[in-house]
Image (cartoon, grey):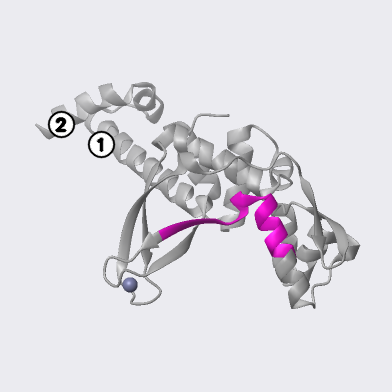
Amino acid sequence: MLALDEQVALALVEQGSRLAPLDQAVLLAATLDGVSPAAAADMPLDRRDRLLIDARMAAFGPDIAFFARCPHCAEGNEADFDLGILPDAAPATGVAARIGAREILLRAPTSTAVARSIRTARPDMLIDDIAGADAQPDDPNWLAAMESALAGAFPLLDVRFEMTCSACEATFDTRFDIVPWLWREIEVMASRTIDTVDRLARAYGWTERDILSLSPTRRGFYLARLAS
Ligand SMILES: [Zn+2]
């Protein structure tokens, strides 16, 4: 896996700042795993997200300070979570599940399948992609059973953190999506890098390449000298 450093962050933001979140996820997976965008788009979503979680932990550590509003009283709550406790991606790309009276092979959803369903504004296409000819998208019981089987087989598809409200003490769970979370952190990293290059280039006339070839510690020495 490619290390998520400043150069990588700059290149990602340069290529992906105007993309939709789903395309940003594919760009991240392709870049970090060193595969083509088409191969990254065909990764099962839980495997893609596991890759992004691993990259996040390697670059920024496992801890996240998660903010969510209480659904009962609207109080803002913050809690720390450890990404290290999240499960691995499922080894298989499909799972056999008993839905109703039948055993059905469910395929793990991919970015390609989600994109096709969004592009055509047809959620049933995603269900067809997952369940094939056995799909029954008009039957709510069948859909609930399919979602439950998918969540059991691919737990990273729907990561939830449980929080307790500091104001009303209600317990609620809230979804964690690694894609916007990691993208935001990469944007911050790229923005700080641009700030550093800008200050050192103005002060010393160095090029971006010169500045990025210095270690962050050494850049820090020059920035401290400028500020003194
Ligand atoms: Zn509350």
Mark 1 lies on residue: 199
Q: Residue at x 87, y 58 (%)?
A: 103
Instruction: Tell me which amino acid carries mark 2.
Output: Leu
Residue with the most extreme right position: 133
In front of the other: 223 or 201: 223
Observer-nearest residue: 72 or 69?
72
Residue at the location (88% across, 63% down)?
Answer: 102
Up the image or down, 2 lies above or below 112; here it is above
Query: Image point 58% across, 58% down: which residue?
Result: 20
Residue 56 position (above or below residue 147):
above
**Among the 4 quarters of the image, the one containing residue 208:** top left
Q: Can residue 225 be spotted in the picture?
A: yes
Question: How many C-alpha atoms fall within 10 Å of the one at disc 1: few (<14), some, or many (≥20)?
Answer: some
Residue 88 in percent (x, y) is at 60, 40
Q: What's drawn in magenta, residue-wise?
A: 146-162
Q: Are marks 2 and 1 in contact (CB under 8 Å)?
A: yes
- Residue under pointer 2: 226
- The residue shown at (16%, 29%) is 224
Q: Which x, y percent locates residue 99?
A: 81, 64
Mark 2: give few (<14), some (14-19) or many (20+) Cα within 10 Å: few
Residue at disc 1, secondary structure: helix
Q: In the figure, is residue 148 to the left or right of 78? A: right
Within the displayed image, which quadrant is ligand 1 positioned in?
bottom left
- Quarter holding the C terminus is top left
Whether residue 17 is visible here, answered yes or no, is no
Residue 205 on the magenta segment: no
Label 1 CB-ligand 1 distance < 8 A: no
Q: Is residue 153 magenta?
A: yes
Amino acid residing under circle 1: Arg
